Image (cartoon, rainbow, N blue to C red):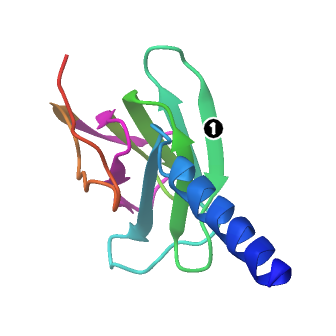
Amino acid sequence: MRMFAMIAVMAGLGLAVAPAHAQDYRARVQGTIVDTGQGTLPGVTVRLINDATGVAVERITDEQGRYLFDFVEPGIYTITSELNGFKKAEQKNIRVQQRGDITSNMVMSVGGVEETVTVEAPKVSVRSTPAARSSRWTRS
């Protein structure tokens, strides 16, 4: 009986800790990089740059051309992608909101590295999906 009580208490503590993980305010930015023929591009260097602070983080796309930035602070960002033999691609004014899930796919064209293709969005989210467990959102 004592063993059962101990297991029940430990299970209850485990359930109490689990919701705390869902309280994180940071977001996720992800996407896929493809060429103009819709072929995925592995090995692309993708940079996520916070426009307010200038802080940049880099990731390399996987075999399916996907990238992922987790735990992104809310703010306005620029995403760049570079790969030898392709023009540098850039997306600006990507609004990352609290607990947001942003998907920003990019298309890269064959060309020299001295050429840059810039896609500038108005200051709104590219694509935002609320988190599975979210609280009430308010605007300031």
The reply, left or right, for residue 63 in relation to residue 89 is right
Residue at 32 percent across and 71 percent down: it is 36
The quadrant where residue 83 appears: bottom right
The reply, left or right, for residue 139 in relation to residue 31 is left
Question: Above or below — where is 112 with respect to 55?
Answer: below
Residue at 76 percent across and 83 percent down: it is 4
Q: Does 110 lie within the magenta span?
A: yes
Front residue of 129/38: it is 129
Front residue of 92/94: it is 94
Q: Does 16 lie within the magenta span?
A: no
The reply, left or right, for residue 27 in relation to residue 2 is left
Residue 48 in view (yes/no) = yes
How far across and down, in percent of the image, does residue 28 sit?
46, 50
Residue at 19 percent across and 36 percent down: it is 121
How far across and down, in percent of the image, does residue 130 sit?
27, 54
How far across and down, in percent of the image, does residue 7 sit?
76, 76
Q: For mark 1, what is the residue?
A: 57
Q: Which residues are magenta?
A: 93-120
The residue positioned farthest toward the front in the image shown:
1
Front residue of 72/115: it is 72
Which image quadrant: the N terminus? bottom right
Amino acid residing under circle 1: Val
The quadrant where residue 139 appears: top left
The reply, left or right, for residue 123 in relation to residue 70 is left
How far across and down, in percent of the image, does residue 124 sit?
18, 35
Question: Above or below — where is 129 with respect to 34?
Answer: above
